C-alpha cells in the first residue's frame, strides 16, 4: 500500500486518495493570483499544526518578511512555528547564479537538521531566472531532482504559468514531477472571477479527472463541492 501525506486542505485530499504519495515531488502551476503560494503554505502549516510534521518553506519569489505578513491574513503565524522549531522559512529571494549550489546545500542542511517531512520551493520560476541559457535550466532541473531524492520528504515546487500560455513554467520541470496540479483563474460571463483546479498527473494515485472550482477564503484554499453534490 502506498503511504500518503495528507495536505489538510479542505475538499482536496479526497481527490487524490487522501493525500500525496509520501516523498513525492508535486508541481503546482498557475498564473498570478491563482493561489499557488496560499495552497503551498497551507500544506506546510497544516502539516506542522495538525499532523506533527516539520516543514521548510523556501522563498525565492518574495522576501521572508513579505511572506510572513501575507500569511497572517489567514491566521497562520509562521513566525511562532519557527520559534517552536516546527518550521523554517528561508529567504533566498536575492539568489544569484553562482549561489544556486550553495542554496541547495543550505536547504538540505535545514531539512535534514530538523528532520522535515514537508518542503516548499517558491518558486522554481524565480530560482531559474538567475540562469541565462535553457541548457542551464535543464541542468538545474536534474540537479534539483537528484537533490530531492536525497532529502526524503514530500516537496511542492511552485511554477508560474503566463496568461494564455499552455506551457508550464520553463517546460522542463514538469517531466520530473510525480504530480502536477494546475490552478487557473478566469472571468465568467458576469465578469466574476472564478478559480479552477485540475490534477493533470499524480503517480500511484487514482486521482480526479475533473476540473474543480475553489475559493481562497480567510481560512485558505477550499475546494468547492461539485454542482449537485
Image (cartoon, grey):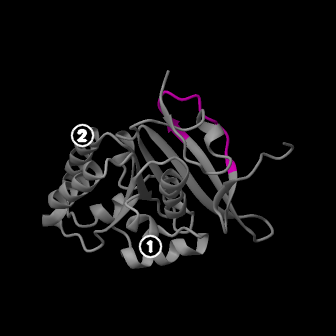
Between marks 2 and 1, how big is the CA–CA gap? 27 Å
Magenta part, dominant SS:
loop
Q: Residue at x 47, y 63 (%)?
A: 162
Q: Where is residue 125 in the image (x, y as percent from the top left)?
A: 35, 61
Q: Earlier in the sequence, mark 2 or mark 1?
A: 1
Residue at numbered disc 1: 67
Residue at numbered disc 2: 150
Q: Position of residue 46 (x, y in %)?
A: 54, 54
97 on left or right of 73: left
Residue, far front: 84
Whether residue 122 is visible, yes or no, is no
Residue, far top: 1
Q: Nearer the viewer, residue 11 or 141?
A: 11
4 on left or right of 176: right
Residue 155, placed above or below residue 178: below
Q: What's drawn in magenta, residue-wise?
A: 200-212
Q: How many marks?
A: 2
Whether residue 183 is visible, yes or no, is yes
**How many residues crowd mark 1 within 10 Å: few (<14), some (14–19), many (20+)?**
some
Q: Where is residue 113 in the image (x, y as percent from the top left)?
A: 25, 52
Q: Residue at x 59, y 75 (%)?
A: 73
119 on left or right of 103: right
Amino acid at each position: 500500500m502506498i503511504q500518503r501525506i495528507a495536505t489538510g486542505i479542505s475538499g482536496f485530499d479526497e481527490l487524490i486518495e487522501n493525500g500525496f504519495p509520501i516523498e513525492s515531488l508535486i508541481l503546482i502551476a498557475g498564473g498570478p493570483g491563482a493561489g499557488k503560494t496560499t495552497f503551498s503554505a497551507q500544506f506546510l502549516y497544516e502539516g506542522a499544526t495538525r499532523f506533527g510534521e516539520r516543514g521548510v518553506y523556501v522563498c525565492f519569489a518574495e522576501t521572508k518578511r513579505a511572506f510572513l505578513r501575507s500569511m497572517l491574513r489567514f491566521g497562520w503565524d509562521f513566525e511562532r512555528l519557527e520559534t517552536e522549531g516546527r518550521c523554517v522559512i528561508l529567504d533566498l529571494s536575492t539568489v544569484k547564479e553562482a549561489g544556486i549550489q550553495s542554496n541547495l546545500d543550505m536547504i538540505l542542511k535545514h531539512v535534514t537538521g530538523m528532520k522535515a517531512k514537508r518542503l516548499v520551493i517558491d518558486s522554481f520560476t524565480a530560482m531559474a531566472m538567475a540562469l541565462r541559457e535553457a541548457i542551464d535550466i535543464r541542468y538545474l532541473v536534474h540537479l534539483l531532482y537528484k537533490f530531492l531524492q536525497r532529502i526524503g520528504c514530500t516537496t511542492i515546487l511552485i511554477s508560474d504559468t503566463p496568461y494564455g500560455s499552455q506551457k508550464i513554467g520553463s517546460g522542463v520541470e514538469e517531466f520530473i514531477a510525480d504530480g502536477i496540479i494546475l490552478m487557473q483563474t478566469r472571468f465568467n460571463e458576469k465578469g466574476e472571477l472564478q478559480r479552477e483546479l485540475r490534477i493533470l498527473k499524480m503517480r500511484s494515485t487514482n486521482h480526479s479527472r475533473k476540473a474543480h472550482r475553489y475559493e481562497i477564503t480567510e481560512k485558505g484554499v477550499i475546494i468547492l463541492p461539485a454542482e449537485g453534490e
